[in-house]
Image (cartoon, rainbow, N blue to C red):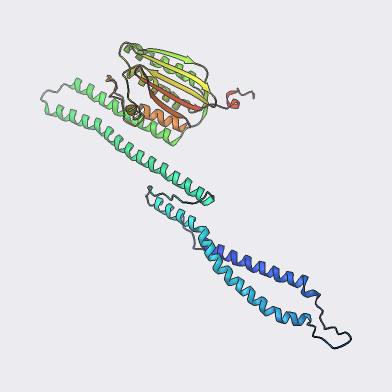
Amino acid sequence: MTRAPGLSVRLKLTLSYAGFLIVAGGLLLATVWVFLLRYVPERAQYGPGPAPFNPTRSDLLEAFAPRAAQAMAFLLVFGLIGGWFLAGRMLAPLTRLTQATHLAAEGSLSHRIRMEGRKDEFRSLADDFDTMLSRLEAHDAEQQRFAANASHELRTPLAIVQTLLEVARNEPNPNTDELIDRLYAVNARAIDLTEALLLLSRSDRRAFSRELVDLSLLAEETTETLLPLAEKRGITIETTGTQAATVGSDALLQQLTTNLVHNAIVHNLPEAGTVWVATSVQPGTVVLTVENTGAKLTDQLVCTLAEPFQRGTQRIRTDHAGVGLGLAIVSSITRAHDGTLRLTPRADGGLRVTVELPVASPRRTQPDERT
């Protein structure tokens, strides 16, 4: 936005300080006039005896006026010089804030103000600005890392398709059916990856409407949907819990629950694994917990599982590698709903995932009685 040039804040404060001194001096002179000079007689009064010198009001004004004018001029100069100095001292933190803002606007997110001194309005603003820069820097680094990973992952199926086509073109009698099947599988994987990226972007932008959602119902629906996959792999699913009402996107929270249960099934012990899905209510929060048996995990590995394109292949190899965005989507959806995601390795092997979301207010959980 283009603005016309104007007076600086320092100059405005300086003029304000000087003007205040002039007004205060004028009020002081007016006070002298009202409460002192007006009681001096206009003419000298003489009594019996020798005539002493009795100054009149005109005499006092003649002697007082030049001194008053000099005092007002001094106050004006003093107010301008002192006001300029004081305004500079007061606005020094704002100057540092302005410089940091310009650096951030030019793309330098690593700069920090780190303003010293006791807490006041400027220092609180500087601390908040530093916090904002830290979050922006972390978000920018995450976006760059995600973009690089996404580019690599999207390039892989395209390279596979190109290789398959080149091999088929060079073969004298290519197997068309096998080529079509392999191209179909690669294309399906690319579509899944693209849809996952779009879902992740949608949750990061919080572009969704909010409504009342019961996590216990989502857990039951997800369990019923994924039960055939669990039975195929010999995995047992146990669902427990009570009504857990929160406010958010029903579709995104359904995706969150589906990703958690799906990961718990595919990253499990073959033919003898178990998945536990539970919902509960705690003060101020509703909790969704998904646990699964499996190989023992280290804390270092668990810390990376919610990052994009971390498939947990070091845990257990399965025939369903996924696109590596399952827990990353869960983490993004949880943040978009102002919740908390915790990943904890189980002592007996496997993983425990806990999602805590704000509980719905009693007003939202009550049915609408309007007709």
**Which residue is most to the front?**
49
Q: In this view, does 6 lie to the left or right of 46?
A: left
Q: Residue 183's image quarter? A: top left
- Residue 163 spot, x, y in % from top left: 18, 30
**Which residue is most to the right?**
48
In which quadrant will I find the C terminus? top right
- Residue 68 spot, x, y in % from top left: 67, 76
- Residue 295 spot, x, y in % from top left: 31, 18
Q: Which of 239 and 314 is in front in this view?
A: 314
Above or below 132: residue 274: above
Above or below 44: residue 360: above
Q: Residue 189's image quarter? A: top left
Query: At 41% across and 16% down in the image, what residue appears?
Result: 276
Above or below 66: residue 195: above
**Which residue is most to the bottom?**
50
Above or below 310: residue 56: below
Query: At 44% across and 32% down in the image, what residue appears?
Result: 335
Q: Total of numbered circles in the picture?
A: 0
- Residue 2 spot, x, y in % from top left: 46, 58
Q: Nearer the viewer, residue 282 or 2?
A: 282
